[in-house]
Image: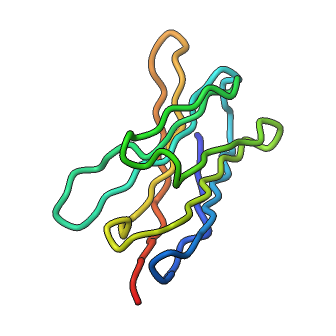
Amino acid sequence: QVQLVESGGGLVQPGGSLRLSCAASGIIFRLNVMGWYRQAPGKQRELVASITNGGTTNYADSLKGRFTISRDNANNTVYLQMSSLKPEDTAVYYCNIRWLFVRTYDYWGLGTQVTVSS
């Protein structure tokens, strides 16, 4: 079984920054994609950013330039550096890891709340 534990969420003022972390543990296939998704109240979960084990990144178009995803392969940890935060960034942020080996393996963390408010 794979577990994902997120940390780093909290309350921040508009224009501020936060760094989220997510550590994955368990039996993990080396070739994988780790990512961050978010879900605001009343909205569907959406992709924020993802990164492959090789370092290839993918961002939601609306977040490019403000958010940066990175990872530490040795520790199966993914980070999300968020800057110039806006109230509309308020959401629960979820960590995800997935890979394909015969079938698709797809695991989620429990989420961490990010609130942007003055």
Q: Position of residue 106 (x, y in %)?
A: 46, 33
Q: State left or right for residue 2 relative to residue 115.
A: right
Percent across and percent down for residue 36 are: 49, 47
Name of the residue lying farthest toward the left: 42
In front here: 7 or 25? Answer: 7
Residue under the point 59% across and 69% down: 18
With 47 as the anchor, is 65 left or right in this view? right
Q: Is residue 31 left or right of residue 48?
A: right
Q: In the image as oriented, which residue stretches furthest toward the top? A: 102
Residue nearer the viewer, 116 or 30: 116
Looking at the image, which residue is at 51% across and 30% down? Answer: 98
From the image, which quarter does the N terminus lie in? top right
**Vertical arrangement, residue 26 with respect to residue 99, above or below:** below
Q: Quadrant of the C terminus?
A: bottom left
Scheme of image coloration: rainbow
Q: Residue at x 36, y 70 (%)?
A: 90
Please tell me how many numbered marks the rendered image carries.
0
Identified at 61% across, 45% down, the residue is: 69
Counting from the top left corner in percent of width and height, residue 78 is at 66, 47
Q: Is residue 79 above or below residue 70?
A: below
> x, y percentage for residue 104?
45, 21
